[in-house]
């Protein structure tokens, strides 16, 4: 992945090593926010550590149908691991991408972050 994708796209802050994560994942337990630690999944999407800027490079490569990907490899995917949650939305027709990355499981509408995420999802629905 590093040679064929990350380097080719100049995703210089992306690597397949969860031990390099700098953001701790959190969850809710008994109405408290509790740290879960760093992700330790060493396979598939769980091993990728990236930045928002590099994720944007990836999404634009997909949106612009970069030669790295064939059309048959395009898919929508949400993911989560130890408090880390990522949602990605792409619209080829409208030429937009949206990604939400968080390090707290189960955002709630009474949280500022939860309200922001909910509002973003509503905006996406309006585009469809």
Image (cartoon, rainbow, N blue to C red):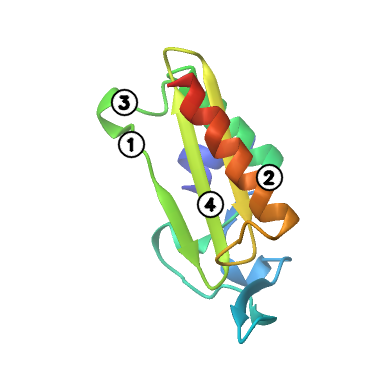
Residue 16 figure quarter: bottom right
Q: Which badge, 1 or 3, comes first in the chain's sequence?
A: 3
The residue pinned by badge 2 equals 116
The crowding category of the residue bearing disc 1, from other C-alpha atoms within 10 Å (few below 14, some 14 to 19, many at least 20), is: few
| Secondary structure found at label 1 | loop
Q: Which badge, 2 or 1, comes first in the chain's sequence?
A: 1
Q: Is residue 93 above or below residue 69?
A: above
Residue 29 figure quarter: bottom right
The residue pinned by badge 4 equals 86
Q: Position of residue 2 (x, y in %)?
A: 52, 47
In the image, taking residue 41 as reference, residue 9 lies left or right, namely: right
Q: Which badge, 4 or 3, comes first in the chain's sequence?
A: 3
In the image, taking residue 37 as reference, residue 63 lies left or right, namely: left
Q: Residue at x 65, y 39 (%)?
A: 54
The residue pinned by badge 3 equals 70
Where is the C terminus found, in terms of image quarters? top left
Residue 9 visible, this orientation: no
Q: Residue at x 60, y 37 (%)?
A: 120
- Rounded to the nearest angstrom, the CA distance separating label 1 from label 3 is 11 Å
The crowding category of the residue bearing disc 3, from other C-alpha atoms within 10 Å (few below 14, some 14 to 19, many at least 20), is: few
Q: Nearer the viewer, mark 3 or mark 2?
A: 2
Q: Is residue 20 above or below residue 114?
A: below
The residue pinned by badge 1 equals 75
Q: Residue at x 39, y 45 (%)?
A: 77
Q: Position of residue 68 (x, y in %)?
A: 42, 28
- Rounded to the nearest angstrom, the CA distance separating label 3 from label 2 is 33 Å
**Circles 2 and 4: CB atoms closer than 8 Å:** no
- Rounded to the nearest angstrom, the CA distance separating label 2 from label 1 is 25 Å
Q: Position of residue 80 (x, y in %)?
A: 48, 62
Q: Is residue 62 above or below residue 51?
A: above
């Amino acid at each position: 992945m590093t040679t064929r994708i990350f380097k080719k796209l100049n995703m210089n802050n992306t690597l397949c090593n969860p031990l390099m994560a700098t953001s701790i994942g959190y969850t809710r337990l008994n109405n408290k926010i509790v740290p879960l630690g760093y992700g330790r999944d060493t396979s598939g999407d769980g091993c990728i550590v990236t930045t928002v800027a590099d994720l944007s490079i990836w999404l634009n490569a997909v949106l612009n149908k970069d030669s790295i990907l064939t059309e048959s490899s395009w898919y929508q995917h949400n993911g989560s691991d130890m408090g880390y949650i990522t949602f990605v939305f792409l619209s080829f027709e409208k030429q937009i991408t949206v990604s939400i990355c968080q390090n707290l499981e189960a955002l709630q509408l009474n949280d500022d972050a939860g309200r922001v995420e909910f509002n973003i999802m509503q905006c996406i629905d309006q585009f469809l």
